[in-house]
Image (spheres, rainbow, N blue to C red):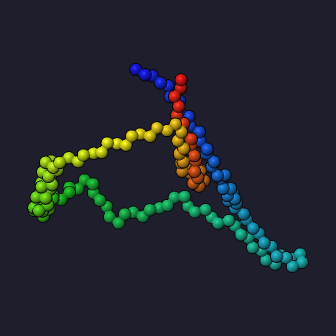
Amino acid sequence: MVKKELEIAVEMEDTAPPPKMEPPDEKKEYTVLMYIGDQLVASSKKLPPAEPPKKIEMPPPPYQIDPYASAAEPDYNVSGVPIMAAAMAIYQTIKDLTGKKEQYAPPQPIQKKSVIFSTFRRTSPDGQFYKATAKISLRIRR
């Protein structure tokens, strides 16, 4: 029996793009006042839009289904299998059982490599896609 100790090393080059900085959602309120001399002539106030409701009401379904109602019995006179389809299925089954088996080619020999580079597609927290490269190395300890 031969015992060998293997060492696997993985090095990742993960260069995630910086997250996009979105401006904060500010709710501003504006007031415009118009004066002639010391007298207020007109004023206008702009408020932020109202928030949409958090709960969406669904209308009731147009009909009700009774889960305890008995289902209609299937009519076996209407549904069935065509005779030709049954005959073809029997023929194909007999052909598959008595026919020659395909000869499978032996698998290709494994290529031995000590270093592999692999690229992964990743998603940053803000939804951007970027590539990360990994270096995977394998060696035998002595």
Taking depth in this image into account, of 37 and 55 the one nearest to the observer is 55
Q: Residue furthest right?
A: 37
Vertical placement of residue 121 versus 140, above or below:
below
Q: Residue at x 68, y 56 (%)?
A: 21
Taking depth in this image into account, of 107 and 44 the one nearest to the observer is 107
**Number of marks in the rendered image:** 0
Query: Which quadrant would residue 80 be assigned to in this image?
Result: bottom left
Taking depth in this image into account, of 83 and 58 the one nearest to the observer is 83
Q: Position of residue 114 (x, y in %)?
A: 52, 36
Q: Residue at x 49, y 38 (%)?
A: 113
Q: Residue at x 75, y 73 (%)?
A: 44
Q: Quadrant of the N terminus?
A: top left
Vertical placement of residue 81 versus 14, above or below:
below
The answer to whether residue 80 of the structure is visible from this angle is: no
Taking the image as shown, residue 87 lies to the left or right of residue 17, namely: left
Q: Residue at x 57, y 51 (%)?
A: 131
The answer to whether residue 45 of the structure is visible from this angle is: yes
Taking the image as shown, residue 99 lies to the left or right of residue 126, namely: left
Q: Position of residue 110 (x, y in %)?
A: 41, 39
Q: Position of residue 58 (x, y in %)?
A: 44, 62
Q: Position of residue 37 (x, y in %)?
A: 89, 78
